[in-house]
Amino acid sequence: MAARPLTWLTEISSQQRNLAAEVIGSPRERIVRALEYLAEQELIELQTAGIRLRYRRIKMPPDVRTLTQSIYERMLQREVREVARLHRVLEFVAHDGCQVSSLGAYFGEPRQQPCGHCSWCLNGGKAVLLPERPRPVIDEGLWRQAVQLRRSQSEALAEPRSFARFLCGVSSPRLSRAKLTGHALFGALDHVQFQQVLDRVGKHRHES
């Protein structure tokens, strides 16, 4: 009967590799190459998980708050652009015309004649009507619980958009640091459109 192989370590973190390099006096890169060699020889099973990209700060910015605000505004602009792209997809689906021609025109290659095989063409030249999404009613009891939580977690949930993201179940580094992504109210309003939740947060701020 073959001997059962021993498992020495099930996970080697970056800190453990750095510590091993310090103890044996070898560069970290050499330890990584040794692990890769052992994996190639099928002596160990090597899997990469939980990769963290490391950055080295070259110099301090002259104004950290200005830099933070600039990055924040860029992220908001990116979010607006991504939402606009999703709306364009919906507009494309419901376009009253040849969808292939419309898509070609978007990329600078319009067609002179309808394609004959898109939904509009196959539907006899009729646009697809998208069903209207009902506007959900936000439960007032749940909302009061969320407001109480926001008061106790003011550092993480004070900003309206962060609070709306929390309620819609959209994670962020700030929410993760505060360990709120595992809270019972995280994603409690994921059935409600984000803009509706954000508008409610803004309304509550003016009422407070």
Image (cartoon, grey):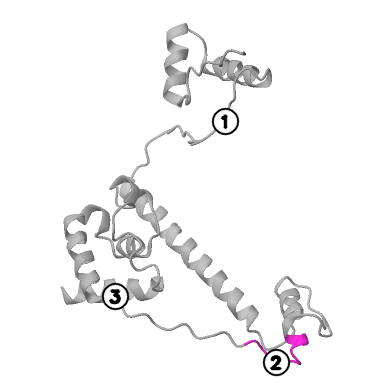
Kind of residue sitting beneath label 3: Arg
- Characterize the magenta stretch by its predominant secondary structure: loop
Which amino acid type corresponds to the residue marked 2 in the rendered image? Lys
For the residue labelled by badge 1, is the local secondary structure a helix, a strand or a loop? loop
Q: Disc 2 or 3, which lies upstream in sequence?
A: 2
- CB under 8 Å between discs 3 and 1: no
Dot 3 or dot 1, earlier in sequence: 1
Whole-percent x, y for residue 12 in the image: 47, 24
Q: Measuring 75% from the left and 74% from the top, which residue is drawn there?
A: 104
- For this view, does 23 lie left or right of residue 103? left
Figure check: 158 above or below 53: below
User: Quick one: 159 or 170, which is closer to the camera?
Assistant: 170
Which quarter of the figure is the N terminus placed in? Answer: top right
Range of magenta residues: 120-128
Q: Nearer the viewer, residue 204 or 185?
A: 185
Circle 3: element type:
helix
Q: What amino acid does circle 1 point to?
A: Gln
Q: Residues within 10 Å of mark 3 (few under 14, many from 20)?
A: some
**Residue name at image x 70 percent, y 92 percent:** 126
Q: Vertical placement of 144 versus 172: above or below?
A: below
Q: Residue at x 55, y 71 (%)?
A: 86
Spatial CA distance of label 2 from label 3 is 37 Å
**Which residue corresponds to mark 3?**
200
Q: Which mark is residue 47?
A: 1
Residue carrying label 2: 126
Mark 2, secondary structure of its residue: loop
Indicate left or right for 138 with 78 as reference: left
Distance from label 2 to label 1 (Cα)? 53 Å
